[in-house]
Image (cartoon, rainbow, N blue to C red):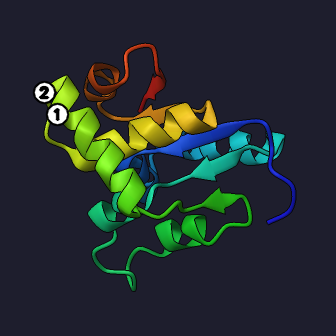
Amino acid sequence: MGPKSTVAVVLDAGALIAFERADARMRALCREGLRIGARLVVPAGVVGQVVRDPGHQVAVRALLRGRTTEVPPLDRLLAEAAGILCGRSGTSDVIDASVAIIAKRERAIVLTSDPEDLERLAPGIRVERI
């Protein structure tokens, strides 16, 4: 994948679903990200939430295999950190918590259909509603 760009965009499940449904705004944001060399970051848990029928999810699979797309694993450290964040914020969605943690780590903006949940997990996180 070449050198890392300083710009990162994290996609949550809502953003990935919007991409799959050919949402014009989401597709335009991805094209712009590619144009400026942004890294698209899709946490592994998000992939698990969205991928249901790979044979029919051609666009999503192509995005996930893209040269500027990264899929960070949901390993033990991230899973524990996400659980702790859920405990501290009074929430229960470990995947949303992993999205928030990765976004903070990457200093990224998150494309999401539900910014309120992410802002509750990580106040001040940069989000863009899809």
Residue 105 position in % (x across, y down): 57, 37
Q: Which residue is mark 2?
A: 90
| The N terminus - image quarter | bottom right
In this rendering, does residue 108 appear at all? yes
Name the kind of residue labelled 2 in the image: Gly
Q: Residue at x 52, y 31 (%)?
A: 104
Tag 2 and tag 1, C-beta contact below 8 Å? yes
Name the kind of residue labelled 1 in the image: Gly
In the picture as drawn, the residue positioned furthest to the bottom comes out as: 55
Q: Quadrant of residue 116?
A: top left
* Dot 1 crowding, Cα within 10 Å, few <14, some 14–19, many 20+: few
Residue 110 position in % (x across, y down): 49, 34
Between residues 93 and 129, which one lies in front from this camera angle?
93
Q: CA distance from mark 2 to mark 1?
A: 5 Å
Residue 73 position in % (x across, y down): 47, 64
Q: Residue at x 32, y 63 (%)?
A: 50
Residue 99 position in % (x across, y down): 41, 43
Would residue 7 be found to the left or right of residue 23 on screen? right
Query: Vertically, is 117 above or below 102?
Result: above
Q: Quadrant of residue 56?
A: bottom left
Would residue 88 be found to the left or right of residue 27 on screen? left
Would residue 28 be found to the left or right of residue 54 on screen? right
In this rendering, does residue 14 appear at all? no
Would residue 91 be found to the left or right of residue 82 on screen? left
- The kind of secondary structure element at disc 2 is loop
Query: Vertically, is 60 above or below 85?
Result: below
Q: Which residue is mark 1?
A: 87
- The kind of secondary structure element at disc 1 is helix
